[in-house]
Amino acid sequence: MRKLFFIVLLLSFCVLSGSLFASSVRVATLGAIGVPTTLSGTTCCYHTVVSTGAYHYVDDSNIFYNPVYLNNIPKNQANYEEGSGGFIASLPERGIKYGVNYGRTDQMFLDSSATANFETAVTVKPLDLQLATTLRGVEVGAGLTFVDVSVADGTTQEKISGVKVNLGAKFALADTWFSYRLINKMEDPGDAAQSKYEDKFSFDLGAQRKVGVFNQYLVLSRRSWEQTAVVGTDNVVTKNAHWDFNIGLGTTTEDSKIGYKIIYGAGVRYITGKYGTASVSGIFVPLNTGLEYTITPWFTLRTGAVYNLYGYTKVGDAVTKSNTTNGPNIGGTFKFGSANFDFLYAQGFSQDKGSNDGLTKIGKIAITYDW
């Protein structure tokens, strides 16, 4: 597994520079899905790239963390993938781009099934509304994400409701964005403690800029939430919070004559916080790389992986070190006129150094149409 990963990485240093637009299925195939952080056996602080785009290269999914990138999409576009869909359109006479998307997998909300009340990946189907334009020479964008659903939890339904606002702008120095969770609540009526979760102060603040062939990024995130549970006749409140700092860079290289395109990036991630009475911290050094090869004008083969060069977590006095791999992944794109059919056929995963869990056939498909 790891040998295949480094073969892909080695090829990435043999060619020139370029750019890429992609659906989230392409992003997943190229290995840009974040490696989850495991704290005391619980998946915590998971940065999904499928739902929020890729910091280290350009793709269509970036609009979900910075709506100003609507302006990067030159045409109108409709999309469908895995039960979600939407469109991006424009009002040329007003210089406005707007987008609507429903059912995208999102991980911004809390899950009561998490051990020690950590934040984990609960799948919800939000509604995304986005708008981008240019004001006094500056490109700006705004987005709203809504959700009000019930998620099955055993024999009961967890009730989740939330509103998140995204703001973005392009300046000469860098592209910037700010995301804030106005509302993020969850109730678990089936829990014996009748647990309730609520965000108190959670946001993302980021900047991204192009320097030569490299795309540099810096992201600061804070997650802060409370759990209220019934213990006897009392309501007991547990406070949880962590800071999450990411810095890194990436680039895309290509040779159009032979049809190769390589995407690679590396970063450093630092987490620190306190969940209940336990102090938590983590340091991670992820490496992403992906390879595309255009075999014919109508078919492109694709593979990629993400590898944690270094992974360290500490919960209380317990220390865990791991080298998790996501990949190699196998997929591609069939192109017919203005329609693209992206697919992810198989995905590899290795939890720690020396292990090999093999490839899993998963069959993800995305369809985009430009006009």
Image: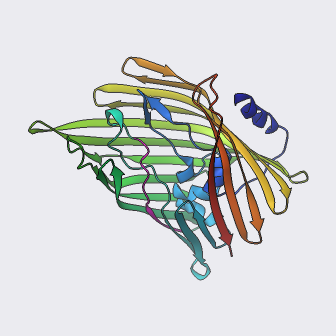
x and y percentages locating residue 272 in the rendered image: 42, 30
User: Horizontal placement of 155 versus 264: left or right?
Assistant: left
- On the question of residue 265 being in view, the answer is no
Indicate the quadrant containing the N terminus: top left, top right, bottom left or bottom right: top right
x and y percentages locating residue 337 in the rendered image: 77, 72
Q: Give the residue furthest to the left.
A: 233
Q: Give the residue furthest to the bottom.
A: 93
Residue 122 within the magenta-colored segment of the rendering: yes
Indicate the quadrant containing the C terminus: top left, top right, bottom left or bottom right: bottom right
Residue name at image x 28 percent, y 48 percent? 198
Q: Nearer the viewer, residue 279 or 307?
A: 307
Residue 225 within the magenta-colored segment of the rendering: no
Q: Quadrant of residue 267?
A: top right
Residue name at image x 58 percent, y 70 percent? 88
User: Horizontal placement of 247 versus 158: left or right?
Assistant: right
User: Horizontal placement of 12 versus 304: left or right?
Assistant: right
Q: Quadrant of residue 349?
A: top right
Q: How is the image coloured?
A: rainbow
Query: Does 100 sit above or below residue 185?
Result: below
Residue name at image x 39 percent, y 62 percent? 146
Tell me which segment is drawn in magenta: 120-135
x and y percentages locating residue 14 in the rendered image: 85, 38
Q: How many marks?
A: 0
Q: Nearer the viewer, residue 285 or 42?
A: 42
